[in-house]
Amino acid sequence: MATFFSNSLDFLASCPGYSPRGGFMNPLQADSVMKNKRRAATYMSTIRKVRSESVPYREALANRHVLTSSTESREGLMQQVAQSQEKISRLEQEKEHWLLEAQLGQVRLQKETQRIAQLEAQITTGGPAETHSAADGPDPECADAPEPLQDSSVIGMLTITPCSESAADQESREHLIKHHYMSRVSELTSQLQMCDSKAVHFHAECRAVAKRLAMAEMSRETLTEELKLAHQNTTRLQDELSTTKRSYEDQLSMMSDHLCSMNDTLSKQRDQIDSLKLASKGNSKKNKSR
């Protein structure tokens, strides 16, 4: 039976006309036979189609493990990036603090250099010394000054020394601090604008990805329904094929029985014919002898 079906796939996949051998058939029976033959042909043509390639289960499982491990490593890297950003922000604050301290120290160095130059000029000319040099010790006005104070913020850290200075020193100090904070504010403003543009870009990308996800979900639901229908059709066609196969087997068995009975009938008829021929030959010989 397997060899017969394998050799007759083209015939079974087609749907030619049907007519009984000898005599006529009931129209209802002919209609049911044609319907079953069409269903069998459709099923055979369906199972003969080449299946699309799919990923093996083991490979899919390995890919899932790789994806899970990559997700875990991504979370760990995100934590490391957050910690690194915190360290960078602290280092930026310290950097701003020391830059400001260096600028203030440079201003103080210039003032001390000018004071030393004035003292040297007064010494060479023999005039009275109106200012104290660095070697003479600290300024008596600043001797009783309290300890310096530190003011920290997001922009940086500022060390404030409460000492009575001249108006020029205070003005230069205020101008330096104002220039430093203005430059820092402009820098932060540019960074904020850049972050805003990146946020807008990422928002647009997220919206596009959300739309793609919604479309993918819709297509997945549609394909799931189609897959269910295909499974139902496959089950129905398998049942119909089994029914058709049983009917063909019954017909083949009936035909074989019919052929056996016909062979028996033919053999009996041949025997009768042979006996009649022998009887006729005997009668003819008797007639000749008379």
Image (cartoon, helix red, strand yellow):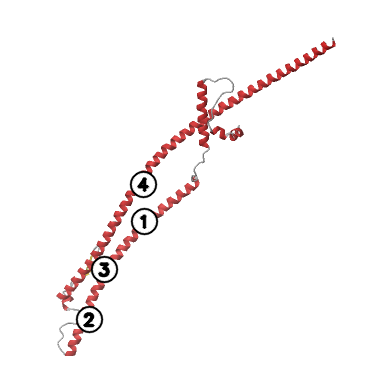
Work out whether mark 2 precedes mark 4 in sequence or the reverse, and give the earlier one. Answer: 2
Distance between the alpha carbons at the discs numbered 2 and 1: 51 Å
Q: Are marks 4 and 1 in contact (CB under 8 Å)?
A: no
Residue type at mark 3?
Answer: His
Mark 1 crowdedness (10 Å alpha carbons): few <14, some 14-19, many ≥20: few
Residue that numbered label 2 is attached to: 113
- Which of the two residues, 160 or 1, is positioned nearer the viewer here? 1
Work out whether mark 3 precedes mark 1 in sequence or the reverse, and give the earlier one. Answer: 1
Residue that numbered label 1 is attached to: 78
Residue type at mark 4?
Answer: Arg
Residue 245 placement (x, y as % from top left): 56, 29
For discs 3 and 4, the disc positioned in front in the rendered view: 4
Work out whether mark 3 precedes mark 4 in sequence or the reverse, and give the earlier one. Answer: 3
Residue that numbered label 3 is attached to: 97
Distance between the alpha carbons at the discs numbered 3 and 4: 48 Å
Distance between the alpha carbons at the discs numbered 2 and 4: 69 Å
Work out whether mark 2 precedes mark 1 in sequence or the reverse, and give the earlier one. Answer: 1
Distance between the alpha carbons at the discs numbered 3 and 1: 29 Å
